[in-house]
Image: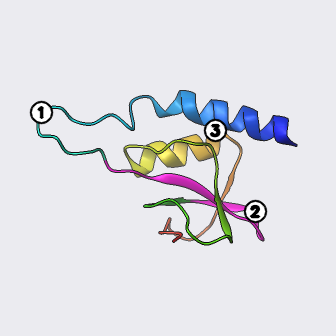
Amino acid sequence: MSKAYAIVAGVLILASGNALAEDASDGTEAKNFYVVQNTSTKECMVAKSEPKDAKFVTIGDTSYATRKDARAAAKQAGCQLAKKKSSDAS
């Protein structure tokens, strides 16, 4: 099972590109979106911040510059995205 998580993490890291890079021109950070999974339902969603509740875990160890990038990475990793609109899983 941990091998599967390692593969998912690798895919998410490769798909992220420069999502964590700062914009040197104005000193602002890129927006961060995370792929998180509800531990009881196993559904994934895109969150605006890293989960603080033990009910959610981050899939992979990276963030994405846009919600679209995070959703694409979740789909590529095989996560079942929740049917409702992505939300903040804090």
Looking at the picture, which amino acid does disc 3 mark?
Answer: Gln
Q: Residues within 10 Å of mark 2 (few under 14, many from 20)?
A: some
Q: Which residue lies furthest to the left in this view?
A: 26
The residue at which mark 1 appears reads as 25
Number of the front mark, 1 or 3: 1
Number of the front mark, 3 or 2: 2
Residue at position x 50%, y 65% in the image? 86
Q: Which residues lie in the magenta part?
A: 31-45
Residue at position x 37%, y 43% in the image? 65
Location of the N terminus (image quadrant):
top right
Label of residue 76 in the image: 3
The residue at which mark 2 appears reads as 42
**Residue 33 shown in magenta:** yes
Q: What element carries label 3?
A: helix
In space, the residues marked 1 and 3 are separated at their CA atoms by 32 Å
**Residue 69 shown in magenta:** no
Front-most of residues 74 and 30? 30
Looking at the picture, which amino acid does disc 1 mark?
Answer: Ser
Residue at position x 70%, y 63% in the image? 43
